[in-house]
Amino acid sequence: MTSESQPAPLPAGFRAAGVTAGLKASGTPDLALVVNDGPDHHAAAVFTTNRVEAAPVTWSRQVLVDGRVDAVVLNSGGANACTGAQGFLDTHRTAEHVAEALGLSAGDVVVCSTGLIGELLPMDKIFAGIDAAAAALSPAGLEPAAIAIKTTDTVHKVAAHAGDGWSVAGFAKGAGMLAPALATMLVVLTTDAVVDPGDLDTALRAATAVSFDRIDSDACMSTNDTVVVLASGASGVEVGAGELTEALTAVSAGLARQLIADAEGAAHDIAIEVRSAASVDDALEVARAVARNNLFKCAVFGNDPNWGRVLAAVGTTRAAFDAAGLDVTMNGVQVCRAGGVGEDRSLVDLTGREVHVVVDLHAGSEAATIWTNDLTHDYVHENSAYST
Amino acid sequence: MTSESQPAPLPAGFRAAGVTAGLKASGTPDLALVVNDGPDHHAAAVFTTNRVEAAPVTWSRQVLVDGRVDAVVLNSGGANACTGAQGFLDTHRTAEHVAEALGLSAGDVVVCSTGLIGELLPMDKIFAGIDAAAAALSPAGLEPAAIAIKTTDTVHKVAAHAGDGWSVAGFAKGAGMLAPALATMLVVLTTDAVVDPGDLDTALRAATAVSFDRIDSDACMSTNDTVVVLASGASGVEVGAGELTEALTAVSAGLARQLIADAEGAAHDIAIEVRSAASVDDALEVARAVARNNLFKCAVFGNDPNWGRVLAAVGTTRAAFDAAGLDVTMNGVQVCRAGGVGEDRSLVDLTGREVHVVVDLHAGSEAATIWTNDLTHDYVHENSAYST
């Protein structure tokens, strides 16, 4: 995986750019463009499951129907959600403008937006930004594109994976999970592998299921979440389903971990690992219940190993377990044994950034981990002052 | 309804007391006792639905099986939850001690505890506190009892309802709903009406369903929530099911409103009213989704009418609605019309304590309201420093 300080290369067949269109009051870059020059134009995507979906999501779902995507245009500074017929028209016009600038079909252009809900985009700035981005397209454009889609992100997020003669690279913004998600999560993955379109879709779903779907910063689902993968085939290297899934999963996991590490106002990254569950679904339900418990999240912020709040959260689920058999370990200290008091809670050190909570259900042999964050003053501050 | 500044009388046939047993480091009162001297000893109760339930809940469920309760003993300063066999034994010994002090059967003594999970209670202090409370029992004991069960409550909560020759009075602590609940909600209701035991149970369930079950401060369910009602029959006035339900509902609603108004760190009390729903369940699901959305709750704290977060929350539910038909009104301003931009959001004034959000689903004729709070710095502060 490439760290953010080392510029990640785009796979062969791709160009990208990030420019300042003037959508954000801050004057920082806010429009990104990614183009797949082929020879293949295979694509797959997953979107938010929020029933109130933004215009660009509605548009992009249609673009993906035939599995071909030539370009992705993304903007920060406005979500174009809850903007009615005009909002959808604006998304359509955005795709048309990209198509004209690049000589493509608008029906092959995915559109992603992120920012405040309920405001129309300034289309003159969008159009000028697209023109500027089209002129700036470059094989070195991954990082500029990643920078241009930041909203409350403090750092941009890129990740890459090198295969034998082929590669995957991607970038992301936001902090949360695909469904639900904190703010909007947008992710673009690119690969120059020669792949079967069906394999690409399957691999993307498998990769997101164990990466973006297993981070849950604040349980809030966005109207705009999108993860799209583009395959150019430009490496000439044929890659099978297994290898492709492995690569997409590695890059997705890397980006997901970066999203959690940069979640709004977070002071701790918390892994909730549920072991000995009767099913993976049970493990996920329990892990998510703990990850969404505000009292537990506040306690971690206060470096307080308040394991009672973990048990209280577990108790709200329908998972198979006996309350008198639950074990909880926090950063290596088994603070709860058989549903009761275990080792001295004062032995738990929560001062580091990473916190590892293990809940043992003693009900089976399945396991799963959800990554989340603590609930902090900075989270409240950022989210009480976002639109004003 | 009696305000907290006017001492509320206990109905005939009841005595109560609140004393300092030394369970709380603060040295404030922490043990309460309520005794029903009859002639009737009818009782009904509802408990947390958390599967990790505290020892006093397990005990009290058994006490209620025969519908007779002679006394309720309550302590703050410790939840006696996740305390294993020793914790249950301690609850049993608490009931035994009350029974001995008052000449009752332990099997007719309800026990309620609230405070930190995962620590055993100091039983010597509990026993001494019970002795002191038994000696202090008085018809004027409602307020001392209410004061003694406070944890993070800044004020004690009492409410009363006067019938024709009979009355209901009750007290509560905590801030949240029965399931789920913030911290622990404990409520004791008393009436001197002559009632049918079956009516009492039905009336309590009806009353809690539209009061405590419709407040949701922070979506966290306690291990200890208990609402118990005792009927002494000492007024000699027979009261039918309808009148009883009305009275219990009035007192429960009054206490529920006080709980929300004193929720941990809250700066706003928010009513989420969902109209034109296909069913009451749909209305409740939508209202609760909004009430639990941290982003929305932070926005209200910041006096920011961020209606996009309301729609994003509505979109996560399975309720019947068309996203293009949703209306949202905040404090009288219709900021969202037909799923899109309505009146100017800057017209909304959120500086007052009460906030009224109306979501119109345009899907039927049912409605429901959930009361919640905003998410504030003080909430994070209180809950990050609770056990340490």
Image (spheres, coloured by chain):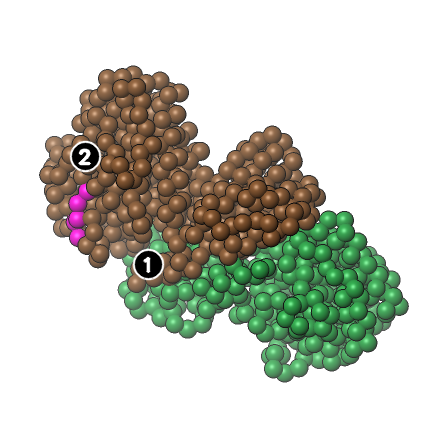
Chain colours: A green, B brown
Q: Is residue B360 above or below residue B309?
A: above
Q: Could you say where residue B118 lies in the image, as x and y percent from the top left?
A: 29, 55
Asked if labels 1 and 2 touch by Cβ distance under 8 angstroms, the answer is no
Residue at screen point 42% across, 35% down: B211
Q: Which residues are magenta?
A: B18-23
Say which of marks 2 and 1 sits in front. Answer: 2
Residue at screen point 20% across, 48% down: B29
Which residue is tagged 1? B386
Residue B140 tag number: 2
Asked whether, in this view, residue B165 is left or right of residue A293, the answer is: left
Quarter of the image for residue A171 reads: bottom right
Q: Is residue B144 above or below residue A127?
A: above
Secondary structure category for the residue under label 1: loop
Asked whether, in this view, residue A112 is left or right of residue A287, the answer is: right
Amino acid at circle 2: Ala
Which residue is nearer to you in this view: A359 or A143?
Answer: A143
Q: Could you say where residue B357 lies in the image, as x and y percent from the top left?
A: 54, 43
Secondary structure category for the residue under label 2: loop
Q: Could you say where residue B91 lies in the image, as x and y percent from the top left?
A: 22, 44
Asked whether, in this view, residue A113 is left or right of residue B359, the answer is: right
Quarter of the image for residue B246 reads: top left
